[in-house]
Amino acid sequence: MQESQSGLKLWLSMTAVGLFTFMSTLDGSIVNIALPVMSKEMNIPMNQATWTVSIYLIVISGLLALFGNLGDQLGKIKIFRIGTVVFTLGSVLAGIDLGLPFLLFARFVQAVGASMTMSNSFGITTTLAPQNLRGRAMSFIAAWVSLGSILGPALGGMLLQNLSWSYIFWINVPIGIIAIVAGAFLLPKSSKQGVKPEIDWWGAISLFLFVAILFLGFNIAQVQGFLAPVPVVTIIIAIIFFVLFVRHELHAEKPLLDLTIFKSKLFTISLITAFLVFVTNFFINVLMPFYLENLRGLSTGTSGMYMLLWPVAMLVFSAVSGTLADKMDREYVTLFGLTVLAVVMFSWFFAGANTPMLVVGLLLAGSGFGMAFFQSPNNALIMSNAPQDKLGVAGSLNALARNLGMITGTTLVTSVLYAVMSAQLGTSVTTYPAKHPEAFVAGMHVAFAVAGILLVIAFSMTYYRVWMRRREKRA
Protein backbone atom coordinates (compact mmCIF):
# COMPACT_ATOMS: atom_id res chain seq x y z
CA MET A 1 0.00 0.00 0.00
CA GLN A 2 1.36 3.46 -0.96
CA GLU A 3 1.91 6.07 1.73
CA SER A 4 -0.05 9.30 1.44
CA GLN A 5 1.68 12.55 0.55
CA SER A 6 1.14 16.10 1.72
CA GLY A 7 2.27 19.65 1.07
CA LEU A 8 3.95 20.74 -2.14
CA LYS A 9 4.92 17.18 -3.17
CA LEU A 10 1.26 16.09 -3.16
CA TRP A 11 0.16 18.95 -5.40
CA LEU A 12 3.10 18.48 -7.77
CA SER A 13 2.19 14.78 -8.01
CA MET A 14 -1.44 15.71 -8.64
CA THR A 15 -0.30 18.10 -11.38
CA ALA A 16 1.62 15.29 -13.12
CA VAL A 17 -1.46 13.03 -12.92
CA GLY A 18 -3.77 15.90 -13.90
CA LEU A 19 -1.78 16.80 -17.02
CA PHE A 20 -2.20 13.33 -18.48
CA THR A 21 -5.83 13.17 -17.44
CA PHE A 22 -6.31 16.51 -19.23
CA MET A 23 -4.60 15.34 -22.42
CA SER A 24 -6.48 12.02 -22.48
CA THR A 25 -9.88 13.72 -22.23
CA LEU A 26 -8.82 16.59 -24.52
CA ASP A 27 -8.04 14.17 -27.34
CA GLY A 28 -11.60 12.89 -27.21
CA SER A 29 -12.94 16.29 -28.29
CA ILE A 30 -10.15 18.30 -29.95
CA VAL A 31 -10.21 16.20 -33.13
CA ASN A 32 -13.87 17.02 -33.90
CA ILE A 33 -13.12 20.54 -35.08
CA ALA A 34 -10.28 19.29 -37.31
CA LEU A 35 -12.37 16.67 -39.13
CA PRO A 36 -13.27 18.88 -42.15
CA VAL A 37 -9.60 19.87 -42.59
CA MET A 38 -8.38 16.28 -42.19
CA SER A 39 -11.03 15.04 -44.64
CA LYS A 40 -9.91 17.58 -47.25
CA GLU A 41 -6.14 17.22 -46.82
CA MET A 42 -6.20 13.40 -46.60
CA ASN A 43 -8.72 13.21 -49.48
CA ILE A 44 -11.14 10.98 -47.58
CA PRO A 45 -14.94 11.23 -47.04
CA MET A 46 -16.13 12.94 -43.86
CA ASN A 47 -17.76 9.74 -42.55
CA GLN A 48 -14.36 7.98 -42.72
CA ALA A 49 -12.63 10.89 -40.98
CA THR A 50 -15.05 10.60 -38.04
CA TRP A 51 -13.64 7.15 -37.26
CA THR A 52 -10.54 8.88 -35.89
CA VAL A 53 -12.80 10.09 -33.07
CA SER A 54 -14.86 6.92 -32.76
CA ILE A 55 -11.96 4.47 -32.50
CA TYR A 56 -10.39 6.56 -29.74
CA LEU A 57 -13.56 6.62 -27.62
CA ILE A 58 -14.40 2.94 -28.27
CA VAL A 59 -10.95 1.64 -27.32
CA ILE A 60 -10.72 3.79 -24.19
CA SER A 61 -14.17 2.81 -22.95
CA GLY A 62 -13.66 -0.87 -23.78
CA LEU A 63 -10.32 -1.17 -21.96
CA LEU A 64 -10.93 0.93 -18.83
CA ALA A 65 -12.05 -2.01 -16.66
CA LEU A 66 -9.11 -4.17 -17.84
CA PHE A 67 -6.48 -1.59 -16.94
CA GLY A 68 -8.26 -0.70 -13.70
CA ASN A 69 -8.08 -4.39 -12.77
CA LEU A 70 -4.40 -4.57 -13.73
CA GLY A 71 -3.78 -1.44 -11.66
CA ASP A 72 -5.18 -3.20 -8.60
CA GLN A 73 -2.99 -6.25 -9.29
CA LEU A 74 0.30 -4.68 -10.42
CA GLY A 75 0.08 -1.20 -8.92
CA LYS A 76 -1.91 1.78 -10.16
CA ILE A 77 1.15 4.02 -10.54
CA LYS A 78 2.98 1.37 -12.59
CA ILE A 79 0.10 1.04 -15.08
CA PHE A 80 -0.32 4.84 -15.15
CA ARG A 81 3.38 5.35 -15.97
CA ILE A 82 3.30 2.83 -18.82
CA GLY A 83 0.17 4.55 -20.12
CA THR A 84 1.87 7.96 -20.20
CA VAL A 85 4.63 6.62 -22.44
CA VAL A 86 2.20 4.74 -24.73
CA PHE A 87 -0.07 7.80 -25.07
CA THR A 88 2.84 10.13 -25.89
CA LEU A 89 4.17 7.67 -28.49
CA GLY A 90 0.69 7.43 -30.02
CA SER A 91 0.55 11.24 -30.20
CA VAL A 92 3.83 11.33 -32.15
CA LEU A 93 2.53 8.73 -34.60
CA ALA A 94 -0.91 10.35 -35.01
CA GLY A 95 0.63 13.57 -36.33
CA ILE A 96 2.47 11.79 -39.16
CA ASP A 97 0.32 11.91 -42.30
CA LEU A 98 0.67 8.42 -43.77
CA GLY A 99 -2.99 7.93 -44.63
CA LEU A 100 -6.13 6.96 -42.76
CA PRO A 101 -5.17 3.35 -41.81
CA PHE A 102 -1.96 4.56 -40.14
CA LEU A 103 -3.84 7.37 -38.36
CA LEU A 104 -6.41 4.89 -37.03
CA PHE A 105 -3.56 2.68 -35.78
CA ALA A 106 -1.96 5.69 -34.06
CA ARG A 107 -5.29 6.65 -32.47
CA PHE A 108 -5.60 3.05 -31.23
CA VAL A 109 -2.18 3.35 -29.57
CA GLN A 110 -3.17 6.71 -28.08
CA ALA A 111 -6.40 5.22 -26.74
CA VAL A 112 -4.62 2.29 -25.08
CA GLY A 113 -2.32 4.73 -23.27
CA ALA A 114 -5.21 7.03 -22.37
CA SER A 115 -7.19 4.11 -20.96
CA MET A 116 -4.24 3.10 -18.77
CA THR A 117 -3.97 6.60 -17.31
CA MET A 118 -7.70 7.36 -17.03
CA SER A 119 -8.53 4.11 -15.24
CA ASN A 120 -5.97 4.72 -12.50
CA SER A 121 -5.85 8.50 -12.00
CA PHE A 122 -8.60 8.64 -9.35
CA GLY A 123 -7.20 5.54 -7.61
CA ILE A 124 -3.78 7.21 -7.39
CA THR A 125 -5.39 10.38 -6.05
CA THR A 126 -7.31 8.45 -3.39
CA THR A 127 -4.14 6.62 -2.36
CA LEU A 128 -1.76 9.60 -2.22
CA ALA A 129 -4.08 12.25 -0.73
CA PRO A 130 -4.71 12.00 3.03
CA GLN A 131 -8.35 11.96 4.13
CA ASN A 132 -8.36 15.64 5.13
CA LEU A 133 -7.13 16.70 1.66
CA ARG A 134 -8.94 14.13 -0.48
CA GLY A 135 -11.81 16.40 -1.51
CA ARG A 136 -9.43 19.12 -2.69
CA ALA A 137 -7.26 16.58 -4.53
CA MET A 138 -10.33 15.10 -6.24
CA SER A 139 -11.52 18.57 -7.23
CA PHE A 140 -8.09 19.28 -8.69
CA ILE A 141 -8.16 16.15 -10.89
CA ALA A 142 -11.84 16.63 -11.74
CA ALA A 143 -11.05 20.15 -12.97
CA TRP A 144 -8.44 18.73 -15.37
CA VAL A 145 -10.98 16.15 -16.60
CA SER A 146 -13.66 18.73 -17.35
CA LEU A 147 -11.18 21.21 -18.79
CA GLY A 148 -9.98 18.55 -21.25
CA SER A 149 -13.54 17.60 -22.22
CA ILE A 150 -14.70 21.18 -22.80
CA LEU A 151 -11.56 22.97 -24.05
CA GLY A 152 -11.01 20.70 -27.08
CA PRO A 153 -12.97 22.64 -29.73
CA ALA A 154 -11.61 26.05 -28.66
CA LEU A 155 -7.97 24.90 -28.47
CA GLY A 156 -8.28 22.93 -31.70
CA GLY A 157 -9.67 25.97 -33.50
CA MET A 158 -6.78 28.16 -32.35
CA LEU A 159 -4.17 25.60 -33.47
CA LEU A 160 -5.79 25.10 -36.88
CA GLN A 161 -5.77 28.84 -37.60
CA ASN A 162 -1.97 28.81 -38.03
CA LEU A 163 -0.80 25.18 -38.06
CA SER A 164 -1.61 21.89 -39.81
CA TRP A 165 -3.91 19.29 -38.22
CA SER A 166 -0.85 17.28 -37.14
CA TYR A 167 -0.27 19.74 -34.30
CA ILE A 168 -3.53 18.87 -32.55
CA PHE A 169 -1.71 15.61 -31.75
CA TRP A 170 1.86 16.87 -31.48
CA ILE A 171 0.91 19.45 -28.85
CA ASN A 172 0.66 16.46 -26.49
CA VAL A 173 4.30 15.47 -26.95
CA PRO A 174 6.18 18.21 -25.02
CA ILE A 175 3.49 18.27 -22.32
CA GLY A 176 3.63 14.47 -22.14
CA ILE A 177 7.41 14.41 -21.76
CA ILE A 178 7.25 17.00 -18.96
CA ALA A 179 4.55 14.96 -17.18
CA ILE A 180 6.51 11.70 -17.62
CA VAL A 181 9.67 13.22 -16.13
CA ALA A 182 7.72 14.86 -13.30
CA GLY A 183 5.95 11.58 -12.53
CA ALA A 184 9.26 9.69 -12.46
CA PHE A 185 10.54 11.96 -9.67
CA LEU A 186 7.31 12.67 -7.77
CA LEU A 187 5.16 9.54 -7.88
CA PRO A 188 6.28 6.77 -5.49
CA LYS A 189 7.60 3.49 -6.85
CA SER A 190 5.14 0.62 -7.04
CA SER A 191 5.21 -1.59 -3.96
CA LYS A 192 3.95 -4.59 -5.96
CA GLN A 193 6.99 -6.24 -7.52
CA GLY A 194 7.14 -9.64 -9.22
CA VAL A 195 3.36 -10.11 -9.23
CA LYS A 196 2.01 -12.26 -12.07
CA PRO A 197 -1.28 -10.77 -13.25
CA GLU A 198 -4.36 -12.95 -13.68
CA ILE A 199 -6.47 -11.67 -16.57
CA ASP A 200 -10.10 -12.58 -17.14
CA TRP A 201 -9.87 -12.66 -20.93
CA TRP A 202 -13.48 -13.65 -21.61
CA GLY A 203 -14.68 -10.86 -19.33
CA ALA A 204 -12.38 -8.34 -21.04
CA ILE A 205 -13.43 -9.40 -24.55
CA SER A 206 -17.18 -9.49 -23.84
CA LEU A 207 -17.09 -6.07 -22.14
CA PHE A 208 -15.11 -4.59 -25.04
CA LEU A 209 -17.59 -6.01 -27.56
CA PHE A 210 -20.52 -4.63 -25.56
CA VAL A 211 -19.03 -1.12 -25.53
CA ALA A 212 -17.93 -1.21 -29.20
CA ILE A 213 -21.24 -2.56 -30.54
CA LEU A 214 -23.29 -0.20 -28.33
CA PHE A 215 -21.25 2.75 -29.61
CA LEU A 216 -21.79 1.58 -33.20
CA GLY A 217 -25.54 1.23 -32.58
CA PHE A 218 -25.76 4.74 -31.13
CA ASN A 219 -23.83 6.15 -34.11
CA ILE A 220 -26.21 4.50 -36.57
CA ALA A 221 -29.22 5.64 -34.52
CA GLN A 222 -28.13 9.28 -34.89
CA VAL A 223 -28.54 8.92 -38.66
CA GLN A 224 -31.43 6.44 -38.98
CA GLY A 225 -33.31 6.99 -35.71
CA PHE A 226 -33.53 4.75 -32.64
CA LEU A 227 -36.51 2.77 -33.98
CA ALA A 228 -34.90 1.86 -37.33
CA PRO A 229 -34.16 -1.88 -37.72
CA VAL A 230 -30.35 -1.66 -37.94
CA PRO A 231 -29.73 0.33 -34.72
CA VAL A 232 -32.35 -1.72 -32.85
CA VAL A 233 -30.68 -5.02 -33.81
CA THR A 234 -27.21 -3.59 -33.10
CA ILE A 235 -28.18 -2.37 -29.63
CA ILE A 236 -29.88 -5.73 -28.86
CA ILE A 237 -26.64 -7.54 -29.79
CA ALA A 238 -24.73 -5.18 -27.47
CA ILE A 239 -27.15 -5.95 -24.63
CA ILE A 240 -26.65 -9.70 -25.22
CA PHE A 241 -22.88 -9.28 -24.80
CA PHE A 242 -23.50 -7.25 -21.63
CA VAL A 243 -25.70 -10.02 -20.18
CA LEU A 244 -23.05 -12.61 -21.08
CA PHE A 245 -20.41 -10.44 -19.42
CA VAL A 246 -22.42 -10.11 -16.19
CA ARG A 247 -23.22 -13.85 -16.05
CA HIS A 248 -19.55 -14.70 -16.56
CA GLU A 249 -18.34 -12.22 -13.93
CA LEU A 250 -20.76 -13.60 -11.33
CA HIS A 251 -19.19 -17.06 -11.63
CA ALA A 252 -15.57 -16.27 -12.56
CA GLU A 253 -12.90 -17.20 -10.00
CA LYS A 254 -10.88 -14.06 -10.76
CA PRO A 255 -13.38 -11.69 -12.43
CA LEU A 256 -12.33 -8.67 -14.45
CA LEU A 257 -14.92 -6.64 -12.55
CA ASP A 258 -15.87 -7.83 -9.08
CA LEU A 259 -19.59 -7.03 -9.13
CA THR A 260 -19.75 -7.12 -5.32
CA ILE A 261 -18.46 -3.54 -5.51
CA PHE A 262 -22.03 -2.54 -6.45
CA LYS A 263 -23.35 -3.81 -3.11
CA SER A 264 -22.43 -0.41 -1.72
CA LYS A 265 -25.53 1.71 -2.41
CA LEU A 266 -23.52 4.89 -1.93
CA PHE A 267 -20.97 3.81 -4.56
CA THR A 268 -23.64 2.69 -7.05
CA ILE A 269 -25.87 5.76 -6.72
CA SER A 270 -22.86 8.10 -6.99
CA LEU A 271 -21.77 6.31 -10.17
CA ILE A 272 -25.23 6.48 -11.78
CA THR A 273 -25.51 10.15 -10.83
CA ALA A 274 -22.14 10.87 -12.46
CA PHE A 275 -23.34 9.15 -15.65
CA LEU A 276 -26.55 11.23 -15.76
CA VAL A 277 -24.69 14.49 -15.22
CA PHE A 278 -22.20 13.76 -18.01
CA VAL A 279 -25.11 12.89 -20.31
CA THR A 280 -26.56 16.38 -19.71
CA ASN A 281 -23.14 18.05 -20.10
CA PHE A 282 -23.04 16.99 -23.72
CA PHE A 283 -26.44 18.51 -24.38
CA ILE A 284 -24.69 21.86 -23.92
CA ASN A 285 -21.63 20.77 -25.92
CA VAL A 286 -23.77 19.83 -28.93
CA LEU A 287 -26.40 22.61 -28.79
CA MET A 288 -24.25 25.65 -28.01
CA PRO A 289 -22.31 25.83 -31.31
CA PHE A 290 -25.66 25.82 -33.18
CA TYR A 291 -27.14 28.38 -30.81
CA LEU A 292 -24.18 30.78 -30.71
CA GLU A 293 -22.97 30.57 -34.32
CA ASN A 294 -26.09 29.76 -36.35
CA LEU A 295 -28.91 31.34 -34.35
CA ARG A 296 -27.05 34.29 -32.81
CA GLY A 297 -24.63 34.83 -35.71
CA LEU A 298 -21.44 34.95 -33.63
CA SER A 299 -18.05 34.13 -35.13
CA THR A 300 -16.32 30.86 -34.25
CA GLY A 301 -13.77 32.75 -32.15
CA THR A 302 -16.41 34.69 -30.20
CA SER A 303 -18.46 31.53 -29.67
CA GLY A 304 -15.34 29.81 -28.35
CA MET A 305 -14.81 32.63 -25.85
CA TYR A 306 -18.36 32.23 -24.55
CA MET A 307 -17.90 28.46 -24.29
CA LEU A 308 -14.72 29.02 -22.26
CA LEU A 309 -16.84 30.58 -19.49
CA TRP A 310 -17.89 27.05 -18.52
CA PRO A 311 -14.42 25.53 -17.82
CA VAL A 312 -13.10 28.81 -16.39
CA ALA A 313 -15.94 28.96 -13.85
CA MET A 314 -15.34 25.33 -12.97
CA LEU A 315 -11.62 25.91 -12.45
CA VAL A 316 -12.24 28.97 -10.28
CA PHE A 317 -14.77 27.26 -8.00
CA SER A 318 -13.24 23.76 -7.89
CA ALA A 319 -10.89 24.75 -5.06
CA VAL A 320 -13.84 26.10 -3.07
CA SER A 321 -15.91 22.95 -3.59
CA GLY A 322 -12.97 20.71 -2.70
CA THR A 323 -12.39 22.59 0.55
CA LEU A 324 -16.09 22.36 1.44
CA ALA A 325 -16.09 18.64 0.61
CA ASP A 326 -13.23 18.12 3.09
CA LYS A 327 -14.92 20.11 5.88
CA MET A 328 -18.59 19.10 5.60
CA ASP A 329 -20.80 16.28 4.36
CA ARG A 330 -19.90 15.66 0.70
CA GLU A 331 -23.46 14.63 -0.16
CA TYR A 332 -24.79 18.09 0.70
CA VAL A 333 -22.15 19.73 -1.51
CA THR A 334 -23.17 17.34 -4.30
CA LEU A 335 -26.86 18.22 -3.81
CA PHE A 336 -26.03 21.92 -4.07
CA GLY A 337 -24.15 21.35 -7.33
CA LEU A 338 -27.01 19.31 -8.79
CA THR A 339 -29.51 22.02 -7.81
CA VAL A 340 -27.49 24.67 -9.65
CA LEU A 341 -27.10 22.44 -12.72
CA ALA A 342 -30.84 21.70 -12.86
CA VAL A 343 -31.80 25.39 -12.47
CA VAL A 344 -29.38 26.37 -15.25
CA MET A 345 -30.61 23.60 -17.55
CA PHE A 346 -34.28 24.53 -17.14
CA SER A 347 -33.36 28.22 -17.63
CA TRP A 348 -32.14 27.39 -21.14
CA PHE A 349 -35.76 26.45 -21.89
CA PHE A 350 -36.53 30.19 -21.98
CA ALA A 351 -33.54 31.20 -24.13
CA GLY A 352 -34.15 32.34 -27.69
CA ALA A 353 -32.81 34.49 -30.52
CA ASN A 354 -33.11 37.71 -28.50
CA THR A 355 -31.85 36.59 -25.09
CA PRO A 356 -29.24 39.12 -23.83
CA MET A 357 -25.73 37.74 -24.29
CA LEU A 358 -24.99 38.62 -20.67
CA VAL A 359 -27.64 36.08 -19.65
CA VAL A 360 -26.17 33.51 -22.06
CA GLY A 361 -22.73 34.05 -20.52
CA LEU A 362 -24.11 33.73 -16.99
CA LEU A 363 -25.86 30.46 -17.86
CA LEU A 364 -22.67 28.98 -19.32
CA ALA A 365 -20.68 30.10 -16.29
CA GLY A 366 -23.46 28.71 -14.09
CA SER A 367 -22.96 25.27 -15.61
CA GLY A 368 -19.28 25.41 -14.70
CA PHE A 369 -20.15 26.62 -11.19
CA GLY A 370 -22.60 23.75 -10.70
CA MET A 371 -20.16 21.15 -12.07
CA ALA A 372 -17.47 22.38 -9.69
CA PHE A 373 -19.71 21.70 -6.70
CA PHE A 374 -21.00 18.37 -8.03
CA GLN A 375 -18.10 16.55 -9.60
CA SER A 376 -15.37 16.74 -6.97
CA PRO A 377 -17.40 15.58 -3.94
CA ASN A 378 -19.17 12.95 -6.06
CA ASN A 379 -15.82 11.57 -7.22
CA ALA A 380 -14.67 11.48 -3.60
CA LEU A 381 -17.86 9.61 -2.63
CA ILE A 382 -17.31 7.05 -5.39
CA MET A 383 -13.68 6.38 -4.46
CA SER A 384 -14.15 6.54 -0.67
CA ASN A 385 -16.87 3.89 -0.80
CA ALA A 386 -14.81 1.41 -2.80
CA PRO A 387 -12.66 -1.24 -1.07
CA GLN A 388 -8.98 -0.27 -0.85
CA ASP A 389 -7.95 -3.23 -3.04
CA LYS A 390 -10.46 -2.25 -5.76
CA LEU A 391 -9.60 1.43 -6.23
CA GLY A 392 -8.36 0.75 -9.76
CA VAL A 393 -11.66 -0.86 -10.74
CA ALA A 394 -13.62 1.93 -9.02
CA GLY A 395 -11.63 4.59 -10.87
CA SER A 396 -12.09 2.80 -14.19
CA LEU A 397 -15.87 2.56 -13.60
CA ASN A 398 -15.93 6.28 -12.84
CA ALA A 399 -14.14 7.02 -16.12
CA LEU A 400 -16.38 4.55 -17.99
CA ALA A 401 -19.49 6.31 -16.62
CA ARG A 402 -18.06 9.59 -17.93
CA ASN A 403 -17.31 8.19 -21.40
CA LEU A 404 -20.64 6.38 -21.75
CA GLY A 405 -22.34 9.56 -20.56
CA MET A 406 -20.60 11.49 -23.31
CA ILE A 407 -21.63 8.95 -25.97
CA THR A 408 -25.21 8.68 -24.68
CA GLY A 409 -25.59 12.45 -24.28
CA THR A 410 -24.41 13.18 -27.81
CA THR A 411 -26.76 10.56 -29.26
CA LEU A 412 -29.76 11.56 -27.14
CA VAL A 413 -29.52 15.31 -27.75
CA THR A 414 -29.11 14.96 -31.53
CA SER A 415 -32.02 12.50 -31.66
CA VAL A 416 -34.31 14.81 -29.66
CA LEU A 417 -33.22 17.95 -31.52
CA TYR A 418 -33.68 16.53 -35.03
CA ALA A 419 -36.93 14.73 -34.11
CA VAL A 420 -38.52 17.97 -32.85
CA MET A 421 -37.26 20.01 -35.82
CA SER A 422 -38.54 17.36 -38.24
CA ALA A 423 -41.94 17.36 -36.52
CA GLN A 424 -42.07 21.17 -36.64
CA LEU A 425 -41.27 21.35 -40.36
CA GLY A 426 -43.06 18.19 -41.50
CA THR A 427 -39.95 16.82 -43.20
CA SER A 428 -36.77 15.01 -42.20
CA VAL A 429 -34.19 17.47 -40.79
CA THR A 430 -30.57 16.44 -40.15
CA THR A 431 -28.84 19.83 -39.95
CA TYR A 432 -29.49 23.40 -38.80
CA PRO A 433 -32.56 24.77 -40.66
CA ALA A 434 -31.23 28.21 -41.63
CA LYS A 435 -34.58 29.35 -43.07
CA HIS A 436 -36.54 28.17 -40.02
CA PRO A 437 -34.63 29.17 -36.87
CA GLU A 438 -37.84 28.84 -34.84
CA ALA A 439 -37.71 25.07 -35.45
CA PHE A 440 -34.22 24.93 -33.94
CA VAL A 441 -35.35 26.97 -30.91
CA ALA A 442 -38.24 24.54 -30.36
CA GLY A 443 -35.90 21.56 -30.61
CA MET A 444 -33.39 23.20 -28.28
CA HIS A 445 -36.10 23.90 -25.69
CA VAL A 446 -37.31 20.29 -25.67
CA ALA A 447 -33.72 18.98 -25.50
CA PHE A 448 -32.88 21.17 -22.50
CA ALA A 449 -36.14 20.14 -20.82
CA VAL A 450 -35.10 16.48 -21.21
CA ALA A 451 -31.68 17.30 -19.74
CA GLY A 452 -33.35 19.10 -16.84
CA ILE A 453 -35.52 16.05 -16.11
CA LEU A 454 -32.41 13.83 -16.07
CA LEU A 455 -30.82 16.18 -13.53
CA VAL A 456 -33.95 16.05 -11.37
CA ILE A 457 -33.63 12.25 -11.40
CA ALA A 458 -29.96 12.57 -10.38
CA PHE A 459 -30.94 14.99 -7.58
CA SER A 460 -33.69 12.63 -6.37
CA MET A 461 -31.28 9.68 -6.25
CA THR A 462 -28.76 11.69 -4.24
CA TYR A 463 -31.45 12.99 -1.87
CA TYR A 464 -32.72 9.43 -1.38
CA ARG A 465 -29.17 8.42 -0.48
CA VAL A 466 -29.03 11.16 2.18
CA TRP A 467 -32.48 10.20 3.52
CA MET A 468 -31.48 6.53 3.77
CA ARG A 469 -28.32 7.39 5.69
CA ARG A 470 -30.27 9.58 8.12
CA ARG A 471 -32.77 6.78 8.71
CA GLU A 472 -29.96 4.29 9.35
CA LYS A 473 -28.43 6.63 11.93
CA ARG A 474 -31.77 6.99 13.76
CA ALA A 475 -32.36 3.23 13.77
Image (cartoon, helix red, strand yellow):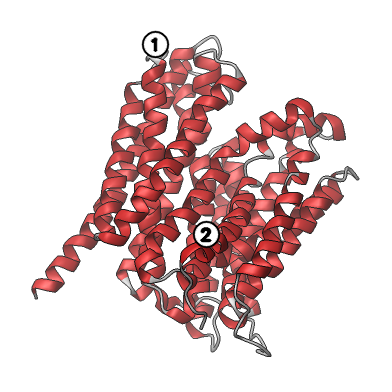
Q: Amino acid at mark 2?
A: Ala
Give how far across and how far down residue 228 sits, in percent: 56, 41
Which residue lies under the disc numbered 1?
354
Give how far across and how far down residue 199 sits, in percent: 64, 82
Mark nearer the N terminus (1 vs 2): 1
Res. 205 visible in picture = no
Identity of the residue drawn at 75% across and 50% down? 174
Q: Secondary structure at mark 2?
A: helix
Which residue lies under the disc numbered 2?
399
Give how far across and how far down residue 143 sits, in percent: 48, 49
Res. 182 visible in picture = yes
Residue toward you, 186 or 335: 186
Identity of the residue drawn at 61% across and 59% down? 16
Give how far across and how far down residue 182 sits, in percent: 66, 62
Q: Residue furthest right?
A: 98
Q: Residue furthest left?
A: 474
Q: Secondary structure at mark 1?
A: loop
Task: Classify residue 43 as left or right of residue 242.
Answer: right
Task: Classify residue 398 as left or right of residue 177.
Answer: left
Residue toward you, 412 or 346: 346
Give the class, few, some or many, for how many residues have Cα within 10 Å of label 2's Cα (few <14, many ≥20): many
Task: Classify residue 241 as left or right of residue 283.
Answer: right
Identity of the residue drawn at 62% across and 81% down? 74
Residue toward you, 450 or 363: 363
Answer whether labels 1 and 2 touch (C-beta < 8 Å): no
Residue toward you, 444 or 24: 24
Q: Amino acid at mark 1?
A: Asn
